Amino acid sequence: MYSYAAFNELTAFLIFAQFIFDSHISSATIARSLASYLVMLLNIFPFFKENWPGWMDPGGVELFGGILSVNLLAPILVLVMTLILCQGLRELTVLNSFMTVTKVLIVLLVISFGAFKVDISNWSPFAPNGYKAIITGSTVVAYAYNGYDAITSSAEESKRPQRDLPLGMLVCVLSCVVLYIGVCLVITGMVSYKSLGVDAPLAEAFAAKGLKFFSVVISTGAVAGLTTSLLGQIYATSRVYVGLGRDGLLPSFFAKVHPTRHIPNHSQVWVGTIAGIMSGFFDVHRLSHILSVGGLASSSIVSACVVTLRLKHKDTRLAYMMGITTYQKGVICLLGVASCGFLAGLSCQSNVSSISILAVVVMAVLFAIVLHYNEEFTEPSGFSCPGVPFVPLVCIFFNLFLFAQLHWEAWVRFVVVNIVSIGIYAVYGQHHANVAASDLQSIPYHKLPSGESQ
């Protein structure tokens, strides 16, 4: 809705497609990792260890030279999570609360116990592949911080969204940053980064230190953590489908809700089906290479929306002489900052001199200054983004900087998804779009029983 209000319907639909595809891939990645940790946990029992079928092995059964990696356990887990979600929010809240407390406690235990097994020589050199590799790697793992946006999709099911959503997002992001950094420092200090597995690195690190009993605890925490993550991804993604179904950009099938439970079961089953298929045929390594495109793109667009929606329509003399409006001038500055961020990313990727990168950064700063001193911005009541336009512009710059560092597979995925999305919009979306009717269609969904509100 941000993109629709600030720009146009097609832009909103394209961002939706990229974001939703990211969510599907993220769900599949989580399911594949969850399957790996569950297998490791069950392997403590001799019966499972000796009779575990190959098609449920964490590595999967490779086909077509490793292009496909078949694992049926991951789709089964996605199916179970989808069925739980279809039972209603009350059941989800109880399970999610229990799992969240469990995983946080175990993460704290991992950091506490693992800190005593750290060998600081494993941190030398601290960046063995250079800081350029750190930047490239950050684009791959950016989706690890995407959980906070799932909170926004629950706005209609929150009692006090204006207070709860900003608070929830800030606490979520800060908590994830602290825990993520702590776990990364411990795990890379315990064993060499070269020895870490892809599917279950935490458990493998503790097992390598002779703490196999603790690897069971870690696997339990990982199962709990990945379970809540998978539930959250399917939940949030299905709500995005509901919004597009209401607006007519997708068939109304996606907007239907259960008459008594008030749950969008159709959307949830659809999301679970797509995630299950992807998790059954692709491993974590291949999925991670095409992740983060939608997250970076949607975050950039939302940041641009914050600026454009708070612009006051005050045309200056310079704008009058140039024949452009305040809105158009703001968009030009936003595009300038975005272009500078992308060029800086390409320059860094191509090992261009630091002077060239600095020149691009200076250009971005000039665009920001022009936007700040030639425009006026409204200050909405309640919680709002501080430091407009500088905070959103910094976000846009760094998002596009990281965007330029993505793997080539991600670029192919970005282009293909855009082409398919434009085709869907041209054939169906633009002819059935009816945003004005969305409020009427959403009445049953807004009126959740008080006992099921979060």
Image (spheres, helix red, strand yellow):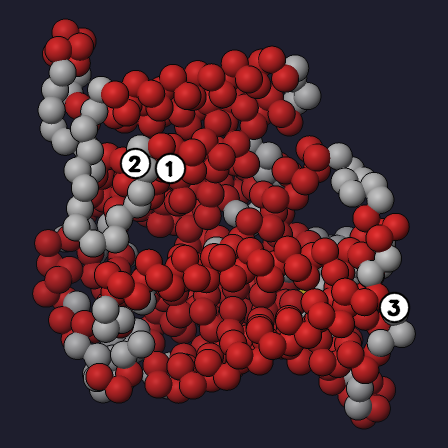
Q: Amino acid at mark 1?
A: Val
Residue 74, percent from left and from top? 61, 73
Query: What's the residue type where badge 2 is placed?
Result: Val
Relative height, residue 384 to residue 175 (above, below): above
| Whole-number angstrom distance, CA of label 2 to CA of label 3 | 49 Å
Q: Residue at x 27, y 71 (%)?
A: 158
Would residue 11 be found to the left or right of residue 198 on screen? left
10 Å crowding of disc 1: few (<14), some (14-19), many (20+): some
Going from the N terminus, do you reach mark 2 or mark 3 first? 3
Image-based side of 384 in relation to 319, left or right:
right
In which quarter of the view is residue 338 placed?
top left
Q: Secondary structure at mark 1?
A: helix
Instruction: Tell me where residue 257 sits by quadrant.
Output: bottom left
Name the residue: 80% across, 86% down: 44
Quarter location, residue 346: top right
Q: What amino acid is found at the position of numbered circle 3 in the picture?
A: Ala
Residue at the image point whose x is 78% and y is 79% from the top: 214
Name the residue nearer the viewer: 285 or 174: 174
Q: Horizontal placement of 193 versus 296: left or right?
A: right
Q: Which residue is mark 2?
A: 388
Vertical order, 178 against 207 (above or below): above
Relative vertical location of residue 433 with respect to residue 41 in this rendering, above or below: above
Residue receiving disc 1:
391
* Residue 27 point in image, percent of width and height: 52, 64
Instruction: Report the mark closest to the observer, 2 or 3.
Output: 2
Residue 123 location in percent, x, y?
81, 48
Looking at marks 1 and 3 on the same chain, the residue that comes earlier in the sequence is marked by 3
Q: Residue at x 60, y 62 (%)?
A: 179
Compared across the picture, whether 51 is left or right of 436 comes to: right
- On residue 161, which mark appears? none
Q: Are marks 1 and 2 in contact (CB under 8 Å)?
A: yes
The residue singled out by tag 3 in the image is 208
